[in-house]
Image (spheres, grey):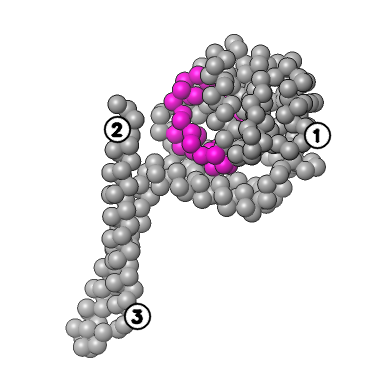
Amino acid sequence: MKLVIGLPAFNEENNLAKIIVKLEKIADRIIVCNDGSTDATGLIAERLDTIVINHSKNLGYGASIKSIFNRAKEENFDVLVTFDADGQHTISDIEKVIKPIKDGKADLVIGSRFLEENKNIPNYRKVGIKVITKVSNFSIKNDISDSQSGFRAYNKKALELINASDSGMGISTEILIKASKNNLSIAEVPINVSYEGDTSTHNPIFHGTSVLLSTIKFMSIENPLKFYGIPGIIFLVIGLFFIIWTIDIFSETRQIVTNISLIGIGAIILGIIMLMNAIILYSLVSVVREQQSN
């Protein structure tokens, strides 16, 4: 079974060499995507026995994953593992992550930080990841515990069917949504992580907000009727309730309670707008998908 390991790397000169040296013992090929690094990341990768993809400028984590996916397809691989180059992942966990694919039990495997208690994860990361994962699970058939883990394994079928587009951190959620849509089998296995030292180049607030917005974006595109339609109906029901209440008060007192009537009118207008958005977006998405299938 041919194992290819992909490393998205941005300014990782302090960690990259020792990770590659260890990965060479288990991988058939290693792909390093140097995402516009300004340090020696690209030079280190080129000096070692790896396939190097150089981005002329920093395009984002998602762009690196897409480049790795495309290059891995050329390698005629059996399993592709994406592995962070910042030193937080444990190389010995790779065997656990690829086992469900080797056994034919999954198309995509996530190395989850939350299937077992992991005291190494800072609390702010735990909260942020779990919030994003809860939101993501609305559009994923599986009940995922860690939607943001970059430690994953893919078989050929998964890479053929998943056409990711996001260039940022939102690609982690996008891949899961599209995998679920294509009825791919998704599994999770527990992994260990280390956050000692500076293992992240992203501001946690900016990072979390960006990923959450990307997650909401893909949810609205993949399930527009559910995303906009259900809230639209709820607002219509609320609006009708307040309008009926307004009419009931008027029939008894011949007075219109402004606050109640405005809430009713506003809720009905908002509900109609959301329902129209649901129908329009659903129609557009259906046309695009039909053209892609032809």
N-terminal-most mark, 3 or 1:
1
Q: Specify the amino acid type for callout 2.
A: Glu
Is 131 left or right of 256, judged from the image as shown? right
**Residue 243, image x and y in percent?**
26, 73
Q: Which residue is mark 3?
A: 259
Please report the bounds of the magenta region as a residue range: 151-179
Q: CA distance from mark 3 to mark 1?
A: 62 Å
Q: Specify the amino acid type for callout 1.
A: Asn
Q: Nearer the viewer, mark 2 or mark 3?
A: 2
Q: Residues within 10 Å of mark 3 (few under 14, many from 20)?
A: few
User: Which secondary structure lies at badge 1?
Assistant: loop
Q: Which mark is residue 290?
A: 2
Total number of numbered labels?
3
Q: CA distance from mark 1 to mark 2?
A: 47 Å
* Closer to us: 222 or 95: 222
Quick check: can you spot residue 100? no
> In the rendered image, which quarter contains the N terminus?
top right
Q: Which residue is mark 1?
A: 14
**Residue 121, image x and y in percent?**
71, 44
Q: Specify the amino acid type for callout 3.
A: Asn
